[in-house]
Image (tube, helix red, strand yellow):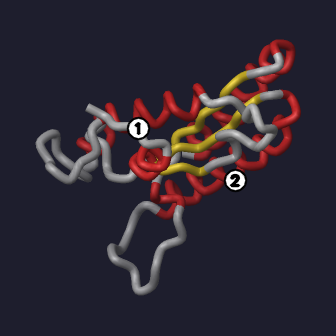
Amino acid sequence: MLAVQVEAPLHLAQLVLPGMRERGRGWILNISSVAARHPALPPARVGGGTVYGMCKAALERFSTGLAAEVYADGIAVNALAPTDVVPTPGTLFHHLTTRDDPRAEQPEVMAEAALALCRAPVTRADGSVGLTGRVAYSQELLAELAIAVG
């Protein structure tokens, strides 16, 4: 899990950063999860998820730290998590949701949030910081940016 969730994004960033620096712009988006949040006690559910949550927390810290390091290069780095469970092959396999679950987040919501983060400039016209160094949640981000899906 560490190799896929933490080491792979680090390695991929190392591969793409030289070209982004050369162009003076770029966007790196890492996909996180609400599992990165510290659990409340007493636990709502017992068993599983600790290592996955730890990996996602590490990914979020990597994203915000890298964003600070490459800000001057015009490169945005963010982490995006779905607000609700998205019916992906993995979540379906682990019985976290179903395809017809009305509480599930549709993949289009994550897609729109990802596009929003990867279109925004690192520095706004007024010199303020754009969308970089964020750990964002899909539905909250879309509401903040007044983007409707559907």
Residue 43 falls left or right of residue 94: right
The image shows a total of numbered marks equal to 2
Q: Which residue is mark 2?
A: 61
Residue at the image position 54 percent from the left and 49 percent from the top:
136
Task: Please say if 40 is above or below 1.
Answer: below
Residue at the image position 81 percent from the left and 38 percent from the top:
127
Tell me residue 35's x, y (percent): 47, 59
Along the viewing direction, whichever of 131 and 16 lies nearer the viewer: 131
Task: Please say if 106 is above or below 17.
Answer: below
Q: Name the quadrant containing residue 118.
A: top right
Residue at the image position 42 percent from the left and 48 percent from the top:
143
Alpha carbon distance from label 1 to label 2 = 26 Å
Q: Amino acid at mark 1?
A: Ile
The answer to whether mark 1 and mark 2 are in CB contact below 8 A is no
Q: Which residue is mark 1?
A: 147
Which of the two marks, 1 or 2, is nearer to us in this view? 1
Along the viewing direction, whichever of 133 and 130 lies nearer the viewer: 130
**10 Å neighbourhood of mark 2: few (<14), some, or many (≥20)?**
some
Residue 19 falls left or right of residue 3: right
Residue 19 falls left or right of residue 40: right
Q: Which mark is residue 97?
A: none
- Give the mark nearest the N terminus, 1 or 2: 2
Tell me residue 108's x, y (percent): 32, 31
Residue at the image position 83 percent from the left and 19 percent from the top:
24
Q: Quadrant of the C terminus?
A: top left
In the image, farthest residue toward the bottom:
42
In the image, farthest residue toward the front:
126
Task: Please say if 17 is above or below 19.
Answer: below
Q: Amino acid at mark 2?
A: Arg
**10 Å neighbourhood of mark 1: few (<14), some, or many (≥20)?**
some
